[in-house]
Image: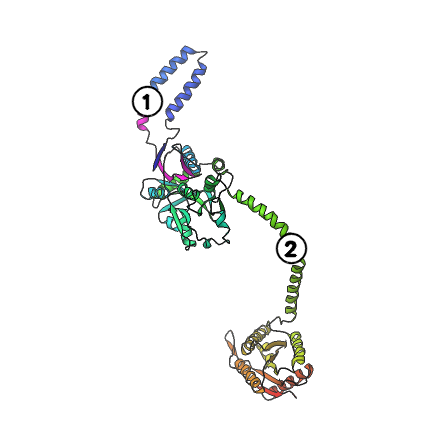
Amino acid sequence: MTQFIVYNATQWPFLYVFLRREKRTETFCSSKTHHISKKIYFSLFIFCLLSPLYLQAQPEKQELIISHSASWKPYSYIEAGEPKGLLIDYWLLYSKVSGVNVRFILADWQESLDNVVHERADLHAGLLSSKQREELFYFGKEIINLQAALYVTKELSKDLKGDISQVEAPVGVVSGGYEEYFLKKKYPSLILVAFPNNGVMYNAAKSGHLKSFVTDTQVANFYLNNQDKSTNYFIPYKVIFEQPIRYAVKKGNEELLNTLHGHVKLITEYDLHNIKEKWTNAAPTIDVWLKQALVVGVILFFISYVYLLKKLVSHRTKILAVQNKKLQKEANTDVLTGLFNRRYLMAKVNSLSIESKKHSFAFLMVDIDYFKRINDEYGHHIGDKALKVIAERLSASIRKQDTLARIGGEEFCIILDIQSFEDAIKIAQKINNNISSHPCKHENNIFNITVSIGCSFIKKNRVWQGSTLLKHADELLYQSKSNGRNQVTSENYA
């Protein structure tokens, strides 16, 4: 752990004012030397007399002890025995605008957190917020956004297919860092190797002991920008998160947090921008990968260009086919119930006339009893609701191979793919019971809905026509109506 003391430039304001006054006096001495000399001696006498009283009256200047990493380029690190970095400059600027002395304690990352928790430091210079950290710290305002990415060797990148969880090699992280917390939570299957700081982790990667690691892109710029293009050449594989760096104090120290907020407001956007430009203007490592990707992309472009020309007409044809299919579906669908309509049903009947030599089937004509009463008593909107309910119950009563359509008003038709007359009667009766046994509800009113059904059965090899089939089923339906409604009338098609 390394400590650095940085003093505020305005520590002796009284003496600073006196020296500025003496300098102006010396300039004027050329014309009135003797007179001014007396003034100087008199001023020095007064200063010597009053300075002990002034210094005794001055309250001791506040000192902030600030903790951070000793190896987190470009944010904070040690170079030639001096603290350097973006966050170091940020808090030196804070000292300048607030008049508060600052002292830095730079250590390994986990120790930098412990320094604040155990009150060896007043605040942490900057870190990412997490639920785990919010139990220990109060977080302040944003300083700069941080983007973290997974870096892998070029050899390892060839085996990956975009999913970080597929990385089988150990992934390096800084112990106690947000990256370690994030990966454990989102990618628990990864094998993580924790290092005390970024410098140690990068040395392990450089020596070939580590094939992948997670760090923020600005740190990577400093460590990877001058790497040689060997087998351990690292590239940014995928960005995994982006969050702002914030300063933090120990949880419970709201007074200090509020003081920091007040002084931070004195830092201008211009000064903050200059600090960011100074430390984040390094050529990004990701550009190296982008250049390589660009070359590959140009080659792939020419290869794919010819392929796309050939596929263009095919693609547009498919789009037209999908649109035509959609239009055809709309043309064959009843808008209110979503069932097939009369147009589709007649086309189906015509196709069955060709296949009837191979298959038997039943044709059911279904009509809602006293439907006009529902419209007259409750209104057409309730009538529409009743039609939808009947459509749902009819759909639930038939099988996938059967066909259901609404052919107009309160009339429905069903084509049953069935081999015996007896089975056709059973299904028709089941449909009738499913509808009559479940009343419909409207507000506080409950009303029963029943249907009458005409069932015409056509054996295979029977010769028939669509118009006569509909007429036969309609006649059977009329018999059900005449015999009291809410019943099924069935007959073999002659």
What is the crowding at mark 1: few (fewer than 14 residues within 10 Å), some, or many (at least 20)?
A: few
Residue 245, image quadrant: top left
Coordinates of residue 219 in the picture (x, y in percent)? 45, 41
Which quarter of the rendered picture does the C terminus lie within? bottom right
Can you name the residue that lies furthest to the front here? Answer: 231
Q: Amino acid at mark 1?
A: Leu
Which quarter of the rendered picture does the N terminus lie within? top left
Q: Amino acid at mark 2?
A: Leu
Does residue 75 show up magenta in the picture? yes
Q: Nearer the viewer, residue 340 or 304?
A: 304
Coordinates of residue 26 in the picture (x, y in percent)? 43, 16
Name the residue carrying label 2. Answer: 308
SS at circle 2: helix
The circle on residue 300 is none
User: Is residue 1 toward the left or the right of residue 151 in the image?
Assistant: left
Coordinates of residue 299 in the picture (x, y in percent)? 61, 48
Relative vertical location of residue 424 with respect to residue 201 in this rendering, above or below: below
Residue 265, image quadrant: top left
Name the residue carrying label 1. Answer: 50
| Magenta residue span | 49-78
